[in-house]
């Protein structure tokens, strides 16, 4: 795809933008609640797990390993410290299964990345565990299409300013594409970039914020098939 004179660099989120992710967390959470069904209702277990995840983000960061540790912590809390070893073993097994789950690419992800590769500098910008994100990128078969990969602990305006300066021509000539308004869109816009929201049917509750509808550089598309045409329209005067 031919580059326009303004936009030179495009950042892509990975989880739930290029491939499925949140659905595996939801499936594992239901399995976890079933393990503790004799001790509490599913809604209460999920609420306690979310509290643990919030507490532990600053310690464990984002990703499956932190989620697994939060499940163990929640199991201990809900059972009053009497969680059987068999339950802990089941939680660990569930975490390992998540870490080994095959990649399921989202519709139009490959086509969009392939069409934009070569015309723009493409940067994968993702949160989470280093080993797990590297595994998923390798399995996706998309790795060779990206000019750079940044696996970060968090996504802030400073993060995007740094990455787009390192791998591009600065935030103002860059774009971030992702499913999370909180992590992918809003901080990128605050850094001076375009922020393109690609909604996913499942988004972690901690990633929910209001869309920045009044921001001139905010756009929303139904899926990644619309991205190349959107980029062309952005490059046109007026």
Image: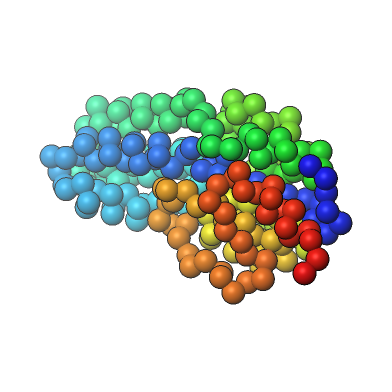
Q: Specify whether 178 is left or right of 71.
A: right
Q: Specify whether 67 is left or right of 146.
A: left
Residue 134 vs 80, above or below: the answer is above
Q: Quadrant of the N terminus?
A: top right
The colour scheme of the drawn protein is rainbow
Q: Specify whether 147 is left or right of 197.
A: right
| Nearest the eye: 95 or 178 | 178
Name the image quarter holding residue 120: top right
Name the image quarter holding residue 113: top right
Residue 7 vs 85, above or below: the answer is below
Q: Position of residue 75 (x, y in %)?
A: 27, 42
Q: Position of residue 210 (x, y in %)?
A: 48, 67
| Nearest the eye: 214 or 192 | 214
Q: Is residue 208 visible?
A: yes
Q: Position of residue 219 (x, y in %)?
A: 61, 61
Residue at image location 66% in from the left, 31% down from the top:
142
| Nearest the eye: 193 or 165 | 193
Residue at image location 80% in from the left, 56% down from the top:
7
Residue at image location 37% in from the left, 44% down from the top:
70
Query: Going by the picture, which residue comes out furthest to the left?
Result: 38
């Amino acid at each position: 795809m031919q580059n326009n004179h303004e936009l030179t660099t495009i950042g892509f989120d990975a989880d739930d933008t290029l491939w499925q992710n949140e659905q595996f967390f939801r499936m594992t959470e239901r399995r976890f609640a079933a393990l503790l069904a004799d001790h509490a209702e599913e809604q209460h277990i999920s609420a306690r797990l979310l509290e643990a995840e919030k507490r532990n983000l600053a310690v464990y960061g984002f990703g499956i390993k932190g989620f697994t540790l939060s499940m163990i912590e929640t199991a201990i809390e809900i059972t009053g410290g009497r969680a059987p070893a068999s339950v802990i073993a089941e939680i660990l097994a569930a975490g390992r299964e998540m870490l080994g789950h095959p990649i399921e690419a989202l519709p139009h992800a490959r086509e969009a990345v392939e069409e934009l590769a070569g015309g723009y500098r493409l940067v994968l910008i993702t949160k989470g565990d280093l080993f797990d994100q590297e595994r998923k990128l390798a399995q996706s078969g998309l790795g060779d299409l990206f000019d750079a990969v940044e696996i970060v602990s968090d996504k802030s305006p400073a993060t995007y300013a740094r990455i787009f300066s390192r791998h591009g021509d600065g935030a103002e000539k860059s774009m971030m594409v992702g499913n999370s308004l909180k992590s992918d869109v809003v901080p990128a816009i605050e850094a001076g970039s375009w922020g393109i929201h690609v909604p996913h049917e499942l988004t972690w509750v901690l990633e929910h914020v209001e869309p920045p509808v009044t921001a001139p550089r905010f756009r929303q598309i139904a899926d990644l098939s619309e991205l190349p045409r959107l980029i062309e329209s952005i490059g046109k005067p007026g």
